[in-house]
Each structure stands twice: as C-alpha cells, then as structure tokens.
Image (spheres, rainbow, N blue to C red):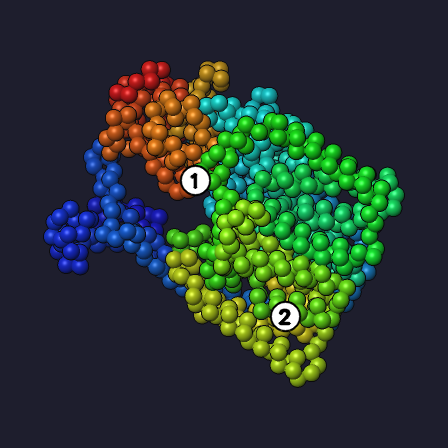
Amino acid sequence: MLDFGGELYKSDDGVANWTLRVDIPSDHPATGGQRGVGFDWRVHLRGVLRAGAYPVRLAVVFDDDQRITLQGAYAEPAVVVVKGNERRLRIVLVLVVLGIIVVARGRSRWSSVGRSLQRGLTGNRVLWGTGAIFAVLVALGVTGSSMGVLFQSTYGSSVLDVRGTSRAALGNESVRGDEWGVQLPNLLAQWHHEPRFPVVNDFLGEGGQNMGVVGMTGVPVRQWAALARPATWGYFVLPLRQAMAWHWQLPFWGCLVALWFMLNVWRPKQRGLNLALSFSFCVAPYAAAWSNWPLYATMFPAFAFVVTTHLLREARAWRGVLMGACLGWLLACWGLVLYPTWIITVGSLMALIGLGWCIDYRKHLRFGMVQLLALVTCGAVLTALMGSWWLDTKDAIALMRATEYPGGRGAIPGGDLGWWWHLRGYHGLESLRRTGPDSNPSEASSYLFLPLLTLVLIVLSLLRDRHTRWTLIGAAMFMLCYWMYTMVGIPISVARATLWGNMPTVRMDVGLGLLTALLLGLFGSVASVPRSKVTQIASLAVVLLSAGLVVLTLWHTPITFVPNAGSWALVVAMVVAISFICGWVLWGRLGSAVALTIWLYLLATLPFNPLRIAPSSVDLAEGHRSFVMAPKASVRTLVLNGDGIGAMAFAAVGVPVVNGVFYYPHRAMWARMGLKAEEWALVNRYQHLGFYAMNDVSDAQGYRLFLGSIDQVHVHVHPQRFDFSCAGATHVAAPAQWTDALTRNPSLSKLGSYQDVVWFSVQSSCQVV
C-alpha cells in the first residue's frame, strides 16, 4: 500500500515488478544482505496534486489487515515536491499592486479620513465602539474556531450530536489542533461534567485531569482563580453558543484596545495611527495561525503597563487603591496564560521599555503613600487569585515540572534559529495556505520584520526625539538580546537566571511584532521627508537592501518548508510591497506604510480564518448512549486508532476515557500495564496518548510503546492478545473494520456498533494472554 498525497493506493492500482537496484550496495542494512533487490511499482495518480512536498510511505498489508511499514534505503522518507501553478500567486501579485495603487493615489483622502478619526478617537468612543462590535458578535454566536475539524473527524462525526452550528464560511484549519482538538474538547468536557466546571475532570484519564493546568485562554473552572480567566466567563452565565463566541472574540478585541491605549501613552496626538498599528498587530498571520492566543498573552501586560503609567502619577489614595487592584488582577490574568514562551518574551520587552519610560518621564512620577497603598493592594489581589489557583493545582504542577516535556525545559541555550527562519514572515502570503513536510502553517507564520528599517528607526528616533530616548534604548536592548539568544546562543547559567532558557527560539515572534508596532508608533511624530542628498541616498539604500533581503530569504527557504517560497510572483509581490513600506516610512508616510502592511496581512489571513455560528449544543449521539448506560463513574472507555484527539471527542460529551490528551502521565495505568522502568521517560510528558491495534506486536505483554514525536505517545496493542483491563478500561471503542480481530480477544465482549464504531465490554482480569 502506498500513501502519497493523502491518497492510498493498493496493489490493484498498479503492478509491482522486482528489479535490480544497482544504486543500493549489497551490504546496506535495508537490503537484509541481499544484492540490489528492489521493486518498480508504477501507479497512476487519481488527481492533480496541489503544490507541496509529499513524503512517500509504503506498507505491506496482509490478508488479516496486518500492516508493516517499509523502511527506505535512506534515513528520511523520499519526498516528492510538487510546484504549484503560478495562477494564484499571480493573482496575489495583482492584489498587492492594486493595494499599493489605492494607498498611494488616495493619500489626500486617507489623510482627511485620518484627521477626522484623530478628532473623534477618544478613549470612551473606542471602548464603546469595540464593545458594541464585540457584543453583537457574541450575541450572534460568531466564532473563528476550527471546531469543524473535530466535528467532521472519524470519531467526531459518529460520536458527537452537534446542533445549531453553521458551516465554516472559509473552511476549517486542521493545523490548529491545539485549539479544536485539545482546548475545545476540554471545555466541552467541563460543560458536560456533573457538577459543571470541576477542578479535576473525571472524564479524562484514570484519576482525572486537573483543569487548572490548561493554558492560553483556558477552560472554565469553578474556583476563585476563574476571575482571572476572562475568556471563560461566558460559560458561567451564557448559553453555549454565546459562550463560545465570547471565548473566541475577547482576545482580538481586547488586545486591539489594550495596544491602542499603550501606544497612546507615548504618542497621544496620533491616535488614528496608533489604532491602525494595533489593528495590524491583531490581524497578523502569527495571531491567526495560533488561534489569537498571542493576542491574549499581549492584552494583559499592555493594559497593565497603561494602568501603571497612570498609577505612578496618581495623587488620590482611593484611585490608587483601585488601580492597584486592577493591576493585580491583570498580572494574575497574564500569569494564568500559562505559556512561558510568550509570557517571558512579552514580559522582557515590556520590562525594558517600561523601565525606559520611567526614566524618560521621571520628573512627572510620584513614589509616595498612594503608590505604596496601590502596591500593597496589587500584591493582595495577585496573591489571592494566584493562591487560589495554586492551592487547587499545585499537585498537578509538580507532576508537570517533573516531566521530560515540557518540564525538562529551562536550560535551552538558544542559537539554533536560522536567519531565513527569523524572516519567514516574508512568505506569509503562501505559508498560511501550504507548507512542506518539515513545517506547518502555524510554525511558518510570523510578522513582517524589517531588521534594517528597524535599526534605522531606532537611530533616527534617538536623534530626533530625546523625550523617549530611554524607551528606545530599552527596545534596542530587547532586539539585541533576541538576536543574541536566537542566533548565537547564551550560556546555560544565563538562560536559567533570566528564564529565557524556557523559550524555544521558533516561538518568540510575538515579541518582534510588538516591537515593530512600538517603533513605528514612536517614529510617527518625528518622521519627516528626507531633504538632503545624504539622507535621500541613505533612505534609498535601506529600501534596496531590504528588498534584496526579501529576495535572499525567499530563495533560501527550503522547499520542504514552503515549496513555493521562491515563486517569481511571490518574490516580486513581496519585493515591491517591502520597498514601498520602507520607502513610505522613511519619507514620513507612516499611515500609508501601515495601511499596506494591513493589506498584506489580510490577504494572508482572511482566507485562513474560518467563520461560523457556534453550536447551540454538543451531545453524545443517541446511537451510542446504550453502550455507556452504566453509572459514569464505573465506565471508562479506551479508544483505539484515533490518536489522543479521537478519545477527546468521547470525553467532550461526558464519556470517561482511558486515553486522550493529558498534561501529565497517569502512573496507575502504566503501573498496571507493567511499563518497564527504562520506558518511563517516554510517557513522562505532555502527551497525545493514542492506542493503535497492530497485528505485528510480538511483545509478551501484547503492546509496544513508541514516541511518535515530542508530545505523541503511541501504544501499539495486539488486538487478540492485549488484556484491555490492564489499561483500566471497562469499554473499548474501535473502528468497525477491527471488529473480527477484537472479537477474538478473550478480555472483550462485543456490545454492538453504531456509525462505523464498534463497542466492547472488558473483562476485569488484567492478565496478559
């Protein structure tokens, strides 16, 4: 059987002829000592493949459905690269050029609109305006979740009874697996639990899953710390549809307002430009590809910075106490994002520019009793909220810290980021649509970072505006630290001391996006048209060198990451766009540059973001209910051949499961299965725990353990010899094609089937047959 391009081809699709492979030496380990043996199998493809890089996988399938994957003669599987036709990218090029023409020709009109906005953009109007949009979207139940991938999956389409949802207007994005396959089932499991929203959810694994460790926007948990998870508030007071919309919409609109307020601290007279910069940050490919979670991680520190700047100038005690309480709440919200990489990245930038702001405005600051009262109040609120979370979650945190992944992080020295990967935002128009086998749209997404322009902006701003000198120095220090850590590396002792050793270098882009928005905002009020020949030549040099860097980056990007990165249409589109952005910035037309940046981001993200009406209910399909009629406490189902996410579909509607996606391992199960001591490191991690029926398992215990990836734990079990009760299962659910093989297992008794899913009850013997 051949797996190629998402299609499976069997022997009846072509004839495999044995042939002499003169290119493989007889002593190669793949030949088993035979001389040059191989085969030639010609297969006619069923359709035209989209552009991409496709690995070629071969397996032998026996009559009893046993499968053995064939290893290639070389370490990596063969990859066939299919170059896409240039038609779509030529359309993108045309759209980019049209965007430039519209922005350039409408300069006077946009300036008039900008001045009108400037006069009308007060804090109250922005708050009321965004609040109204947010409220309407929530009331309608509009969400951008890729939940359709779960609903349409093999198990999801059989097990889940989804009502009231609409089809996604722009399709679903399977790459957002952490959103639709982990967070969504977790929050639905909380919704269906009795009582609702427990700290420990009994549906997820033997012993249950502590839900306080679920990070990003989190899931609803009935504890005081829920006050610091505003994205989950809707589940406590709203119907499911509106609660899901609240959960999705809050990060975008909240970050938009927070970043606007933050930029206004430095440049209150350019509120229109600041709003455009905030919008560009929120619609960037990096935010879209990561389900808007980077926006959530940025929203709280941005608001906290704004509150702090007011607090340090406040003279009234009662307002100081209120601001201190608000600051403590914001810091708790930020901490409960629970994703160290984004917390540390954004926190480092905010600390450096915040210190710079304090030095720049030191003559206007107060450090008296009001600030002391505020600090005490802040500490009290922060301690109360985080303390509530800690008391409920400390045992789970201890288990997570003891894991190989992510607990083993903390001493990453950095220095492993390629320069072309650092600038991968240049192929965002293509990478959100397709990537090669060595990447995915989320990992390949980023911001348009222009290093030469950034350095020039810092220098020019330092020369022209001494009021923000130390803020700019803080920004420059962050950029220097970023480059040092990602490109060169730092000593492990420094990595531990600064906490930077917790950050994989490929996940730190949110700091670059925030830095770019800040620098453009600071440069806005000091930008001017270069008049001397020297400055004009320097500006032209920056434009040409930045364009050259675009070409170099796109041509250097490996085809296994983005096959079409070197497409002439994409290269021309990005060269022209980046040239205009750099030129407009240096010639004082920041509004035009930001407008073009937004246009580029929207061209990339609008086709990527699905839009749908959230479901009014998600329940267990009626046909499966009879198989789990026993009290739920006594039922626990092991789900075969569905990875961890397949099992999560059952937990989402209240069926307790053995396997799933777990933030820490469940020792009792592994002890009962007789896991070898030397294999504990394989399972001691955040894991997608998948059980797979495999006929080629020869181990005495009837199972073999594999680490599919850093977070993929695969257990291959023999369908006839594995004792499923040793996994703690009372029921087994499997694809219908495994019915005959599983029926011959002495520990199983068939209950029935529904929609291609077969159910078995398990005899509690825990004896390996």
The amino acid type, in three-letter code, at marker 2 is Val
The image shows residue 349 at horizontal and vertical percentages of 64, 53
- Taking the spot 57% from the left edge, 65% from the top edge, the residue there is 450
The foreground one among 423 and 196 is: 423
Q: Quadrant of the N terminus?
A: top left
Q: Residue furthest bottom?
A: 533
Q: Quadrant of the C terminus?
A: top left
Going by the image, does 461 lie left or right of 720?
right
- Taking the spot 62% from the left edge, 30% from the top edge, the residue there is 390
Q: How many marks?
A: 2
Q: Is residue 521 above or below residue 171?
A: below
Q: Is residue 721 above or below residue 50?
A: above
Task: Give residue 580's mark.
Answer: none
The amino acid type, in three-letter code, at marker 1 is Asp
Q: Which residue is mark 1?
A: 711
The earlier-in-sequence mark between 1 and 2 is: 2
Residue 649 visible at all: no
Task: Give residue 456's mark.
Answer: 2
- Taking the spot 28% from the left edge, 18% from the top edge, the residue there is 746
